Amino acid sequence: MEQQKIEQHKQILIPPIDLLQSTKKDIEHWLASLVMRPFHARQIMRELYAKYKQRKDRYEVKKKADLPLELKDIVLNQKKEAFDAVGNQAILKLAEKHVSVDGTTKYAFLLVDGKKIESVFIPQKSKNTLCISSQVGCAVRCTFCVSGKDGLLRNLSAGEIVAQVLAVLDDDKSIDNIVFMGMGEPLHNYNAVVSAISILTDPDGLAWSSRDITVSTSGIPDKIIQLGKDTKVLFALSLHAPNNALRDQLVPINKRWPLKVVLDACAQFPSSEKHPLMIEYVLLKGVNDALGQADELAELLGSWHTKGSWFVVNLIPFNPHPYATYERSDAAVVFAFKKRLMTAGLKTFIRETRGYEIAAACGLLTQGKGKEN
Ligand code: SF4
């Protein structure tokens, strides 16, 4: 009874905090409210993430410092609530896992409210990439993408974003790059995405290099500028059309923020030859894959380059699905388009299609009602 009273007393005194959602700054504020010194935030983060620390070669894995006694119970209890005995997380449960013939692995995760999200692990010769989601569904509704077909269901929390990375690490995958190219428009969920980046890159969190994280957006100008100030991540713009008339159709958000406004914002995002901005362009047969459109694209991007931005173009052959009538451009057309851009002086790559047969390729991720279900 006495013990119960002490516990109740503690609960009244200690303001609640969800540690898995919290950046170091959040934890420092919480400690301040307990009149405790901020440096304990480092110890708390190390306690939570030591197991997941990446890049042992580049970052020294610091020894977990002992938590002060007055914090130990609280932190260890929170940790126990967040992870079960075998390390599974409370906020994200693996619902399905599909492995493609090329090794691409798609994970469907169940959230606590029963909604589903998907993440894709893409093994590559040099570096492995994990593509994560930032929202359940997407409000942008690009006409070629399955993720936006039902609109936005809800934002993910910072913890749910980070948890995707933890879950895939728990599946013994070695991840080099993290890309926000799964479900959702990351900049529509700005605060949670930036908090997640902070936890991922914090030396006492997962110690990821910001340069190994890419945020891809359909183009929200003020948030693009803000992201360039708040983080050091790499940046990708989903362009998909060389003019406003066509982009209005493919990426409807263009009606609100047309090309010039978006590209002006991109010009304020720091870039260099070593860390260029990525321009993503999905190739749709007979829609945006003509050589004349390649010329128009080269002209558009060429004028932008003069503003001091460095960029590369990534051509993405469309991955057909039942929710859109577009077709994939012929391989010869894709190569001709690339050649035209290269001739105009634009560094251009063709993105290899990975995991198509398990609906894990670009534009195919769903909240559980997509192609495979
Ligand atoms: S392409 Fe990206 S921004 Fe467009 S609907 Fe799909 S998830 Fe949303």
Image (cartoon, rainbow, N blue to C red):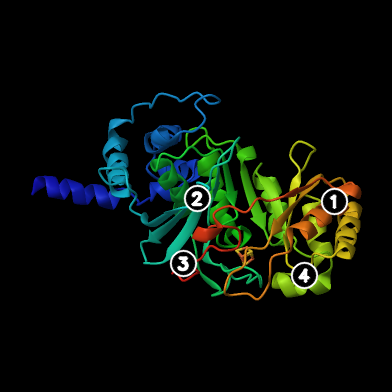
For disc 2, the marked residue is: 101
Residue at position x 27%, y 52% in the image: 12
Ligand 1 shown in quarter: bottom right
> Could you tell me residue 221's position as x and y percent?
74, 60
For disc 3, the marked residue is: 372
Separation of disc 2 and disc 3 at Cα? 16 Å
For disc 4, the marked residue is: 247
Q: Which label lies toward us, 2 or 4?
A: 2
Please, what is the three-letter code of the amino acid marked with disc 1?
A: Lys
**Mark before the other along the chain sequence, 1 or 2:** 2
Which secondary structure lies at badge 3? loop
Q: Which label lies toward us, 3 or 4?
A: 3
- The part of the image, by quadrant, that contains residue 62 is top left
From this view, report whether residue 4 is shown above or below residue 329: above
Which secondary structure lies at badge 4? helix
**Contact, mark 1 vs mark 2 (Cβ under 8 Å):** no
From this view, report whether residue 175 is shown above or below residue 134: above
The C terminus, quarter of image: bottom left
Task: In this rendered view, identify the residue nearer to me: 139 or 251.
Answer: 251
Q: Which label lies toward us, 4 or 1?
A: 1
**Mark before the other along the chain sequence, 2 or 3:** 2
Separation of disc 4 and disc 1 at Cα? 22 Å
Which secondary structure lies at badge 1? helix
- The part of the image, by quadrant, that contains residue 67 is top left
For disc 1, the marked residue is: 339
